[in-house]
Image: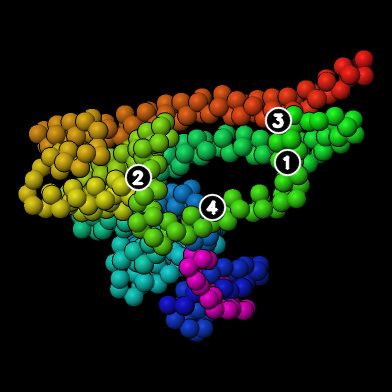
């Protein structure tokens, strides 16, 4: 179904812009009128893979508010169609409002709620649709929305932890690069000009500094552009090449400190998603299948695919996890306890709580390790510049008898 950019006015005459899927212009007009909007102009969006990669995403906070709203309306006995219409009309985020409008139209046409949400997998992932489907089958959508709120809040907390781990090193690297460019383009050329004017031979350390300064001044744009190009190329390769993505994820898991933190975050996601879905009545095979899609690391995801095949053959879940060699003994032991006691969801919640605390410690440990490392890099840079500049300057002053 084509995607349209539109400009419309609401009942108060205020202009609003957004995007909406529709079969044609008339369908777009009808869908906007259902949202109490009058179409002014519209253009069809020509999408490609690059725009989909860098497209802005709806925030977790918006989804949490939507789920809370739907849960309260459902618990109050409001029909699903009316509840979706109410959420659509009260949502302030334009993109989410358009999505809810499409979901409302799909449900009105006879689709189930899980099918309607499943039509937008980039926003509503497999966990979202699986929980809604389980709620529909059990007749308890209100509980499904509560589980979704719990899941989304936990996901937001994990995202915050990851940002915390990345933020400090990123800021320090920008500061170091800024200092490096300032010294090489502004300070070093002035001092080197003075040293060359003395006519004395320059030591190798100073000649290396001169060569570096000249290169930075002449090819500064290459130094700035190449990392950006490499990052974009790596992102595209990871998007389109599963083998490349697997190799990168495999190396990331084996990196000191960082690999340990990535593994803990992935295991926390796995145990959390599995516990939430299993608690909601989703069958264990479907829980494992969904976990393969939500665990961000492809190595662990492939291991879970092997787990799924092993369980389908009639083996115990804990035995299948142990056979992969990717899951620590704690997870395997807790799963075995859950299987023996018949309380798998609770034991996996305990695993999630354990790894939540462990991830916090891992993030703090990574930041504590990065601080002296980055400080050492700055110290080495400054020591090199001081040796290269002040050594010849001291020799020059000594020959002049100063």
Judging by the rendered image, the residue that carries numbered circle 2 is 250
Label 1 to label 2, Cα distance in Å? 38 Å
Residue 102 shown left or right of residue 329 in the figure: right
The residues bearing labels 1 and 3 have C-alpha atoms spaced at a distance of 10 Å
Numbered disc in front, either 2 or 3: 3
Q: Judge whether residue 38 is colored magenta.
A: yes
Specify whether residue 61 is in view: yes
Give the mark nearer the N terminus: 4 vs 1: 1
**Residue on which disc 4 sits:** 231
Residue at x 50% of width, y 71% of height: 48
Kindly identify the residue that appears in the image at 71 percent across and 40 percent down.
Answer: 212
Nearest the viewer among 300 and 73 is 300
Q: Please report whichever mark, 1 or 2, sits nearer to the chain's N-terminal start.
A: 1
Q: Quadrant of residue 355?
A: top left
Indicate the position of residue 4 as horizontal and vertical percent values: 53, 75
Q: Separation of disc 2 and disc 3 at Cα?
A: 39 Å
Helix, strand or loop at label 1? It is helix
**Relative side of 136 to 195, left or right:** left
Mark 2 lies on a secondary structure that is helix
Measure the C-alpha gap from mark 2 to mark 4.
18 Å
The residue lying at 17 percent from left, 38 percent from top is 322
Which residue is labeled 1 in the image? 211
Q: Nearer the viewer, mark 4 or mark 1?
A: 1
**Residues at circles 2 and 3 in contact by the CB criterion of under 8 Å:** no
Residue 205: which disc? 3
Q: Kindly indicate whether the residue at mark 1 contacts the one at mark 4 (C-beta within 8 angstroms).
A: no
């Amino acid at each position: 179904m084509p995607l349209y950019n539109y400009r419309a006015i609401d009942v108060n005459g205020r202009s609003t812009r957004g995007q909406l899927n529709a079969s044609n212009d008339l369908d777009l007009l009808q869908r906007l009128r259902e949202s109490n909007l009058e179409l002014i102009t519209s253009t069809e969006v020509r999408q490609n893979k690059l725009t989909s990669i860098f497209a802005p995403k709806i925030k977790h906070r918006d989804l949490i508010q939507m789920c809370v709203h739907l849960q309260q309306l459902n618990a109050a006995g409001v029909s699903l169609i009316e509840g979706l219409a109410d959420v659509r009309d009260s949502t302030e985020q334009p993109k989410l409002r358009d999505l809810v409008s499409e979901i409302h139209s799909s449900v009105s046409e006879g689709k189930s709620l899980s099918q309607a949400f499943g039509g937008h997998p980039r926003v509503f992932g497999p966990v979202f649709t699986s929980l809604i489907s389980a709620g529909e089958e059990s007749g308890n959508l209100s509980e499904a929305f509560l589980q979704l709120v719990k899941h989304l809040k936990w996901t937001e907390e994990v995202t915050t932890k990851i940002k915390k781990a990345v933020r400090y090193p990123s800021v320090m690297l920008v500061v170091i690069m800024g200092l490096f460019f300032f010294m090489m383009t502004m300070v070093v050329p002035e001092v080197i000009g003075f040293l060359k004017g003395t006519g004395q031979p320059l030591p190798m350390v100073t000649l290396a500094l001169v060569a570096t300064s000249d290169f930075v001044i002449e090819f500064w744009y290459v130094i700035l552009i190449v990392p950006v190009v490499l990052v974009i190329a790596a992102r595209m390769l990871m998007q389109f090449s599963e083998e490349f993505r697997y190799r990168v994820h495999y190396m990331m898991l084996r990196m000191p400190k960082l690999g340990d933190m990535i593994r803990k975050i992935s295991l926390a996601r796995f145990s959390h998603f599995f516990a939430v879905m299993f608690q909601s009545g989703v069958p264990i095979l479907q829980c494992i299948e969904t976990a393969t899609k939500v665990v961000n690391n492809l190595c662990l995801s492939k291991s879970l695919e092997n787990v799924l095949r092993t369980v389908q053959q009639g083996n115990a879940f804990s035995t299948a996890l142990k056979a992969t060699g990717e899951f620590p003994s704690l997870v395997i032991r807790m799963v075995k306890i859950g299987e023996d006691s018949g309380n798998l969801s609770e034991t996996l919640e305990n695993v999630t709580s354990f790894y939540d605390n462990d991830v916090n410690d891992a993030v703090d440990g990574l930041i504590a390790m990065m601080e002296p490392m980055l400080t050492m890099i700055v110290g080495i840079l400054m020591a090199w510049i001081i040796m290269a500049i002040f050594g010849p300057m001291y020799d020059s002053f000594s020959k002049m008898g100063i």
